[in-house]
Image: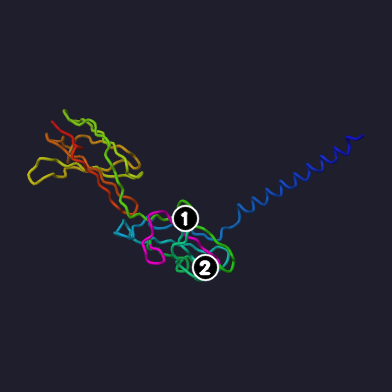
Amino acid sequence: MLAQPTTRLSIAAFAVLVVATIGAFFVTQHLKVETPLIQGAPAFVPPAINPLHPVRCGKYNSGVATISFYLQKRSDDVDVYVVNDQTDAIVDTLATGRHMRTYHRYPDGLFHWGGRESNGLLAPDGTYHLRVTLIHQGKTVDLDGAQQVVKVRTVPPRPVITSIQPRVITAPGTHVTIRYTGNEGRGGTILLYRLGLPGGPRLIKSFPTPWKGQSAVWDGTVRQGLPAPAGTYLVALQVTDAACNTGRYAASNDTVTAR
């Protein structure tokens, strides 16, 4: 007879647990499907800049990054800041109290950053993102996803050729494997210079390296696919990063001899 109250108590406790679990589930699902405040797939273009030595980089100026977005739920006045990813410190203010209408990306949600702090000093090399404060909604949104950040890069890549095998080509069709590091996961260009010619080294061939690879193969030919004439060839490597900074490597002992 004593077991009955205990059983009823257990059932009641179980029921409360089930209700709480279901409630938590629906709250979680609501949060997952809640409409974001900011839309428009915001991303900096270009994704890396060099404000110290800006150049034409593809279709863009490498000294300025541009990003745009729009408000989804309601119009608001916004403050927009540039934040250092590593320190979480605000380094620059792009807008104060700017009014943004819903679904108006341009000109309301268009912002430019030239890679400098609010005091005019160059921002340190690193990764940065936007922090948007929606004043009347009392909310702050960090646009810090992997595709939303911008990098300041003022130091060129430092590629290094680590090995060349074989060092001697004795027959047409011999392939030479060139291994390297420091390309930062990007493609590069192998440059072949023929030494011992009047007027100094002469570039006789260049070809791209595999994207994100760390080795490339020279097929032993020069221009027009002809076998490399007898002589000594210097192997060099250059790599350009996303901010269009180019790093080059050439060591006097990185040579291949064709016989």
- Image check: 163 left or right of 11? left
Can residue 22 be seen from the camera position used here?
A: yes
Closer to the camera: disc 1 or disc 2?
Answer: 1
Considering depth in this image, is 36 or 114 the residue closer to the camera?
114
Mark identifier at residue 147: none
Residue 161 located within the stretch drawn in magenta: no
Q: How is the image coloured?
A: rainbow
Q: Would you identify the image quadrant in which residue 1 lies?
A: top right
Q: Residue at image x 10%, y 45%?
A: 200
**Residue occupied by mark 1:** 87
Q: Residue at image x 78%, y 46%?
A: 16
* Residue placed furthest toward the left: 198
- In this picture, which residue range is highlighted in magenta? 116-134
- Image check: 29 left or right of 217? right
**Residue occupied by mark 2:** 78
Graded by Cα atoms within 10 Å as few (under 14), some (14 to 19) or many (20 or more), the crowding at tag 2 reads many
Q: Would you identify the image quadrant in which residue 46 lies?
A: bottom left
Q: Would you identify the image quadrant in which residue 153 lies?
A: bottom left
- Image coordinates of residue 25 in percent, x first then y, are 67, 48
- Residue 56 vs 191, above or below: the answer is below
- Image coordinates of residue 34 in percent, x first then y, are 61, 56
Residue 130 located within the stretch drawn in magenta: yes
**Quadrant including the C terminus:** top left
Residue type indicated by callout 1: Thr
